[in-house]
């Protein structure tokens, strides 16, 4: 019996991180100084294009780091979907640390994402090879190409 090649035993995980935003006060022309500081409602997110179960089999938690002007600048999300909601007015670099389940024996993955309030669809894709055996579905179909159009990332 022929052994499977290393390529056959791996799958490429498409990790998408990004942000969506909308105006917090869309019908207000002259914002107060307080409103000016929160003129955008935004979501920062991480998505692997997997189902909830598959994501939670791989990811223990995602830690989002904001700048110090935010109350509670370190946010930890331990369940899919891995996203945080916030309000603000200035772009800044968000640090994102993906902690994998212990059984994977993988180091945490650190990513950076600069918030954008200009482009509605602001995201980047990172490719990571993992063992196919880590996923419950060997014929995994990833959907990150359209992740920003999925309802789980729409702003309310």
Image (spheres, grey):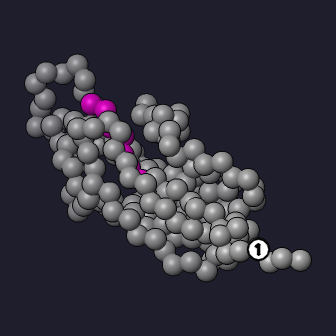
Question: With respect to residue 9, does 67 lie above or below?
Answer: above
Question: With respect to residue 83, does 29 lie above or below?
Answer: above
Q: Residue at x 67, y 63 (%)?
A: 57
Locate the C terminus by quadrant: top left
Q: Residue at x 65, y 70 (%)?
A: 7
On screen, residue 144 versus residue 103, left or right, reads: left
Q: Secondary structure at mark 1?
A: loop
Locate the N terminus by quadrant: bottom right
> Which residue of the protein is positioned furthest toward the front in this rendering?
2
Res 34 quadrant in image: top left
Question: With respect to residue 90, does 68 lie above or below?
Answer: below
Q: Which residues are magenta?
A: 17-23
Question: Toward the viewer: 51 or 35?
Answer: 51
Mark 1 neighbour density, 10 Å: few (under 14) some (14–19) many (20 or more): few
Q: Which residue is mark 1?
A: 4
On screen, residue 53 versus residue 13, left or right, reads: right
Q: Residue at x 46, y 71 (%)?
A: 109
On screen, residue 107 versus residue 102, left or right, reads: left
- Helix, strand or loop: magenta stretch: strand
Residue 135 visible in rendering: yes
Give the image location of residue 104, x and y in percent: 64, 75
Residue 74 visible in rendering: no
């Amino acid at each position: 019996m022929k052994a499977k090649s290393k390529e056959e035993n791996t799958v490429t995980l498409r990790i998408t991180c990004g942000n969506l935003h909308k105006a917090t006060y869309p019908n207000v022309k002259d914002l107060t100084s307080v409103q000016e500081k929160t003129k955008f409602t935004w979501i920062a997110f991480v998505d692997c294009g997997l189902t909830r179960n598959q994501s939670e089999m791989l990811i223990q938690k995602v830690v989002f780091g904001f700048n110090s002007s935010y109350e509670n600048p370190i946010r930890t999300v331990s369940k899919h979907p891995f996203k945080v909601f916030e309000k603000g007015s200035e772009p800044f670099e968000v640090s994102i640390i993906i902690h994998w389940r212990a059984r994977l024996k993988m180091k945490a993955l650190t990513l950076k994402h600069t918030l954008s309030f200009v482009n509605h669809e602001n995201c980047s894709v990172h490719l990571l090879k993992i063992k196919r055996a880590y996923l419950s579905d060997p014929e995994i179909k990833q959907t990150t190409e359209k992740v920003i159009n999925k309802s789980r990332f729409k702003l309310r």
